Amino acid sequence: MDYGKHMEKRMEARVKRGVAKGVKIFFFILLGIGIFLLVGYAFMLLWNWLMPELFGLPTVGYWKAFGILVLAKLLFGFGGHGSGGGKKKSGKGGERPVCRNRVFETKDKWAYYDRFWNEEGETAFNNYIQRLNNETGNAPAEEHPGTDR
């Protein structure tokens, strides 16, 4: 295959991808407008169902309901900003806080616990208890110090 045909096929594929992307964008815009208009209609139905009966307010048409919805959004905010509440994240993007690194280090250390206990743990623990008894000058009265029986 010569270079000209190869370039022609590449250009044709690029155009097809561009057209497909353009069609998707067009339909997403239409979908957004449809949802936007549907929300206004739902708001009008809810208003006309609840407000006249509860508060004695008049019923409204679609465009007045839509205007009330937009006004409420402007006054009370649009919400949906996630769990951050508008707070800026500290540090550079992608860095984890130091405390998380410590947790991972601790987990790595615990992976060796069983092996340590089998090799040295019981002997080391008994030596620790003996050292405590020598420091205080008396043997523990109970099998488990610090528990009331």
Image: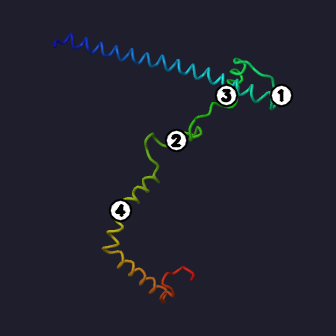
Disc 2 packing (10 Å; few <14; some 14–19; many ≥20): few
Check disc 4 and report the residue beneath it.
Answer: 111
Which picture quadrant has residue 2?
A: top left
Q: For the N terminus, give its image quadrant.
A: top left
Q: CA distance from mark 3 to mark 2?
A: 26 Å
Dot 1 or dot 3: first in sequence order is 1
How many numbered marks appear?
Answer: 4
Check disc 1 and report the residue beneath it.
Answer: 56
Please tell me whether mark 2 sits on a helix, a strand or a loop. loop
Q: Can you tell which of label 2 and label 1 is closer to the viewer?
A: 1
Q: Nearer the viewer, residue 49 or 97?
A: 49
Check disc 2 and report the residue beneath it.
Answer: 89
Q: CA distance from mark 1 to mark 4?
A: 68 Å
Amino acid at the residue labelled 4 = Ala
Check disc 3 and report the residue beneath it.
Answer: 73
Dot 3 or dot 2: first in sequence order is 3
